[in-house]
Amino acid sequence: MSPSKRRAYRAPSAAQRARYAKRRAGRMSRADNDLTPAEWEAILLAWGEACAYCGRGASALQKDCVQPLSRGGRYTRDNVVPACRSCNASKSNDEVTAWMRRKGLDERAFLLRWAQFQRTATASAGSVSPRA
Ligand SMILES: [Zn+2]
């Protein structure tokens, strides 16, 4: 067996590595942009333009993923709720119900409202293929 066979594999060049990184970044931003501005408006209205978790009205509500990105959640209409800066920062990557319990927030009321919103959103959007 000739030793040259072992050299068939070549490590990716710097340019190739850069291309891979760019492709990865593209995937991430596509996931982020899955939620359209119109969908975000609808979400804000559905929650009365208040924080979904503590109910406080805030001028600058942030998009919060109920299922955090780190746990497979995505920026989609089914997964994003408005959150005040304080809730968003506090919840971070925590599992939502565990976090709400810890904060003494009403997780049952939240889950009911969230389920309600998803039902109405799906009904008004007509045929929507379910997202995994
Ligand atoms: Zn809040």
Image (tube, rainbow, N blue to C red):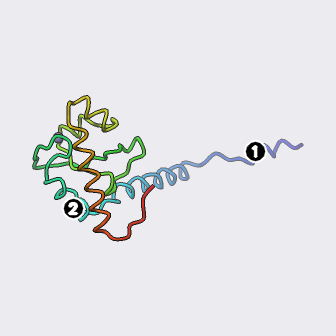
Q: Position of residue 10 (x, y in %)?
A: 68, 47
Left or right: residue 102 compared with residue 56:
right
Left or right: residue 59 compared with residue 7:
left
Task: Choose top left, top right, bottom left or bottom right for residue 76.
Answer: bottom left
Mark 1 → mark 2, Cα distance in angstroms: 57 Å
> Where 96 sits versus 16, above or below?
above
Left or right: residue 22 compared with residue 36:
right
Mark closest to the chain's N terminus, 1 or 2: 1
Q: Foreground mark, 1 or 2?
A: 2
Residue at 31% from the left image edge and 47% from the top image edge? 65
Residue tagged by mark 2? 42
Q: Which residue is at the front of the view, 124 or 66?
A: 124
Q: Which residue is at the front of the view, 129 or 94?
A: 129
Extreme residue toward the bottom, this view? 126
Task: Choose top left, top right, bottom left or bottom right for residue 96.
Answer: top left
Crowding around mark 2 (Cα neighbors within 10 Å: few <14, some 14 to 19, many 20+) is some
Q: Which residue is at the front of the view, 32 or 113?
A: 113
Q: Which amino acid does the dot numbered 1 rest on?
A: Arg
Q: Position of residue 61 (x, y in %)?
A: 17, 49
Q: Position of residue 100 (x, y in %)?
A: 25, 35
The kind of secondary structure element at disc 2 is helix
Give the quarter the ligand 1 occupies: top left
Residue at 19% from the left image edge and 57% from the top image edge? 46
Residue tagged by mark 1? 7
